[in-house]
Image (cartoon, helix red, strand yellow):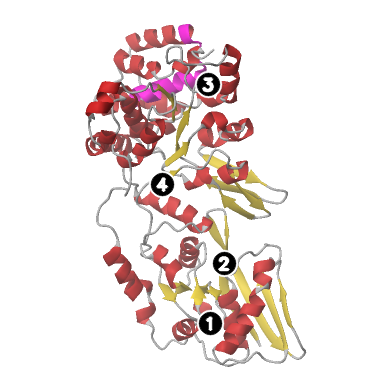
Amino acid sequence: MLININAAKCVGIDAVPVTVEVDIARGIGIHLCGLADVAVKESLLRVVTALQALGFHVPGMKIVINLAPADLHKKGSGYDLPIALGIIAASGQAEMPALGEYLIMGELGLDGSVRGIAGALPFAELAVRQGFRGCILPETSALETVELDDAEVYGVRSLGDALRVLSGNGAEDLLIKNSRVYREALENSAAGTGRPGYMDFADIIGQDGAKRGAEIAVAGGHNLILIGPPGSGKSSLARALSGILPPMSHEESLLTSKIYSIAGKAYGGIGLMHARPFRAPHYSASVAAIVGGGNGDNILPGEVSLANGGVLFLDELGQMPKSLIEALRGPIEDRVVSISRLRTKISYPASFMLAAATNPCPCGYYGEGDRCTCTVGQRAGYLARLSGPIMDRIDIHLWMHPVAPGKLVNRVKGEGSAAVAARVLKARALQTERFRDEGISVNAEMGSRQLERFCPLSEACKEMLERLIDRMGLSARAFSRIIKVARTIADLAGERDISPQHIAEAAGYRFLDRRYLG
């Protein structure tokens, strides 16, 4: 008897249908086909043991299990549950009239329990697109889908729960929105909107100029680099960006949540992500870890995609391999990363704000009186990894000097993150309204067409820019980025037009274009 069960596989940020076909006929042995990886092949042992533990028998006949389409690689343990249900149905051990109406995924334990899987959010979206009645997922994974209004998702803890749903006898208590685990998660979820443990701006002593630059960067989604000696507060200021990031829109939240779901990254909450991600990989991370990688069509997102909609913080940028730094050029400019293999090309969103920190030289003290022990050649070689094309893509350069001893001793605190976040939110609201029909959300994403439309320049601004380009030797990309930063400065000031003062401040944040460290 041939049985078909609906399953799925993630390709990029979307899921594609996979049909688990189970046929039982005369003969012996269990045969699995359909380009399955090792984890899928091992599912046969897990499934047989789980069935026996729950009192089902495995027919002593030939069982053929096919994962269609056969030319698509299948990876992971999520096919355990559909395979087990297919064997039960094909052998006639249980009635499951609703079997073809649901998309089913889940890993089986040897005792018949169902464990979590990656990709629950795209699976639920696929079930809606394909017109299925709903989907059956592990309970912990189904929590990701509670904010999808059109999806009927059942969260199951065991194979027996799945059988109860498919029997059609009523299993409303297993709907994830009706489940006890969902109610408990709601009760335990944090009531506040802030990110726990973030550094408050008020806790960073001094550095008012750098704080101003950081506020502008977050308000417009601009990339920034912090340069300074050890202990000047570069890492603290970068981590304080978490406290002034605005909340995500529903579209941003859904997209970023799908990336985390596919990567199997638990973020400790229910439903979609609402706090913007802050990713801080170690400087020794590989190119594949930063950009993404894998084999065949099983390509996982890297840090640039996990930071989508948020901040990618690269500390000790000067210590990173040059090949890794150069690999960021495409994602920074295009806000998408495309990973190609022999037969596959996968694209992931990578619209992040880059925050980088580095020392100015190997000893770290260039620019601090006579403390630097490096030669001119050593300084030039240290920052040579930051090529012109990379620096062109970084809008705001901030030099951070050590804080004066008097401020440190007296703990003179400045403005807190809450006040800064309020200004950032107001500026972002202006940009959301401005770009409502443009397909972008922040000033940093503007292209040439949007620059011409939303950033008209007066004659005074044009004259100032002409002098700046001539004096600083700016590229066309740096020129456009100065205008974008100036637009953000005007938004923070609540002004409709860009003025020469805004241009001057924006240009002042590009001191590295003058080869200041040469």
Q: Is residue 476 magenta?
A: yes
Picture coordinates of residue 433, whole percent (x, y): 30, 37
* Badge 4 or badge 1: first in the primary sequence: 1
Residue 361 numbered tag? 3
> Disc 4, disc 3: CB below 8 Å?
no
- Amino acid carrying label 3: it is Cys
- Amino acid carrying label 2: it is Ala
Q: Does 61 sit left or right of 358 as displayed?
A: right
Above or below, 136 relative to 295: below
Mark 4 vs mark 3, foreground winner is: 3
Residue 112 numbered tag? 1
* Badge 4 or badge 2: first in the primary sequence: 2
Residue 240 in which image quadrant: top left
Q: Does 283 sit left or right of 355 as displayed?
A: right
Give the residue at mark 2: 8
Q: Secondary structure at mark 1?
A: loop
Q: Which residues are magenta?
A: 471-488
Give the residue at mark 4: 277
> Disc 4, disc 1: CB below 8 Å?
no
Residue 113 seen in this snapshot: yes
> Disc 1, disc 3: CB below 8 Å?
no
Q: CA distance from mark 1 to mark 3?
A: 59 Å
